[in-house]
């Protein structure tokens, strides 16, 4: 016992002195009491701090969760919404919603292209007999493109029977036809006569409105003055479409 509490024995005390032993025991109890009070005071100070930290953590967690939920609610679901169409795309798809059937009634057209070895320019009138059949009267003016001899030209026309399809998607129509043509010399007429021949073609018609279309056609024809293949393009107008 004297060795255990030797640190608390005053220098003036002696071993075996009862008063010294009592002082040592009292001093030991005082030290333990002070240590206990210090520990209790520390625990009392730490508990409020822990409570405050726990409360702040819960509040922060709730705020973060609320903000994430609001962000998800306000963000649009792009996967379920159709992509917005640009004005250009809306105009491009506009023909699909035409209320009038395009390309109906009598049509007036103009054309230009290759006619055998000549350059062709012309006008045409198409008169439908039914939805799929009609006749066309074409006026032609041919310019010889060879470098030999003087300037040579011919004028005339062709009478054709044509067949055509519906206008698919209000945009595209297929057609074809053929008939008899008559061409007479218009320039460099010396020694040349009126020629009778025939020919035909098939083509594609592309509508930009119910009243107007562009066409491209390929065919061939025989007989003087310029036999060979024909490749023509032009425009058609339908002023009486309904």
Image: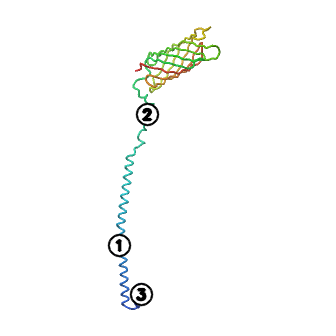
According to the picture, the residue beneath numbered tag 3 turns out to be: 2
Please tell me whether mark 2 sits on a helix, a strand or a loop.
helix
Q: How is the image coloured?
A: rainbow
Q: Quadrant of the N terminus?
A: bottom left
User: In x, y percent, where is residue 24?
Assistant: 38, 86
Q: Residues within 10 Å of mark 3 (few under 14, many from 20)?
A: few
Please tell me whether mark 3 sits on a helix, a strand or a loop.
loop
Q: Residues within 10 Å of mark 1 (few under 14, many from 20)?
A: few
Task: Work out how far the residue at label 2 is from the one at label 1, CA to CA, in angstroms.
Answer: 76 Å
Q: Is residue 118 above or below residue 75?
A: above
* Occupied quadrant, residue 226: top right
Q: How many marks?
A: 3
Which circle's residue, 2 or 3, is located before the other in the chain? 3
* Occupied quadrant, residue 197: top right
Q: Quadrant of the C terminus?
A: top left
According to the picture, the residue beneath numbered tag 1 turns out to be: 41
* Occupied quadrant, residue 22: bottom left
Q: Residues within 10 Å of mark 2 (few under 14, many from 20)?
A: few
- Picture residue at 43% right of the left edge, 29% below the top: 94
Residue 74 located left or right of residue 125: left
According to the picture, the residue beneath numbered tag 2 turns out to be: 87
Q: Nearer the viewer, mark 3 or mark 1?
A: 1
User: In x, y percent, where is residue 213?
Assistant: 47, 23
Task: Work out how far the residue at label 2 is from the one at label 3, CA to CA, in angstroms.
Answer: 102 Å
Which circle's residue, 3 or 1, is located before the other in the chain? 3
The reply to whether discs 2 and 1 touch (Cβ–Cβ < 8 Å) is: no
The reply to whether discs 3 and 1 touch (Cβ–Cβ < 8 Å) is: no
Q: Is residue 112 above or below residue 97?
A: above
- Outermost residue to the front: 150
- Picture residue at 41% right of the left edge, 26% below the top: 98
Q: Is residue 64 above or below residue 211?
A: below
């Amino acid at each position: 016992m004297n060795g255990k509490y030797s640190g608390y024995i005053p220098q003036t005390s002696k071993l075996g002195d009862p008063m010294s032993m009592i002082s040592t025991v009292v001093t030991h109890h005082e030290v333990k009491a002070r240590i206990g009070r210090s520990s209790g005071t520390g625990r009392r100070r730490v508990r409020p701090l822990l409570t405050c930290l726990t409360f702040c953590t819960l509040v922060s967690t709730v705020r973060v969760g609320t903000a994430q939920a609001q962000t998800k609610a306000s963000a649009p679901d792009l996967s379920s919404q159709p992509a917005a169409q640009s004005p250009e795309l809306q105009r491009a798809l506009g023909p699909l919603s035409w209320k009038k059937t395009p390309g109906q009634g009598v049509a007036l057209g103009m054309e230009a292209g290759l006619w055998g070895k000549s350059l062709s320019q012309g006008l045409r009138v198409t008169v439908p007999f039914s939805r799929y059949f009609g006749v066309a009267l074409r006026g032609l003016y041919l310019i010889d493109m060879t470098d030999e001899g003087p300037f040579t030209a011919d004028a005339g026309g062709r009478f054709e029977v044509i067949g055509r399809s519906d206008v698919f998607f209000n945009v595209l129509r297929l057609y074809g036809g053929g008939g008899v043509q008559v061409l007479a010399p218009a320039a460099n007429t010396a020694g040349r006569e009126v020629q009778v021949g025939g020919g035909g073609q098939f083509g594609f018609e592309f509508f930009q409105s119910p009243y107007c279309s562009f066409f491209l056609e390929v065919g061939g024809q025989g007989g003087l003055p310029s036999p060979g293949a024909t490749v023509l393009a032009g425009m058609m107008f339908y002023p009486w479409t309904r």
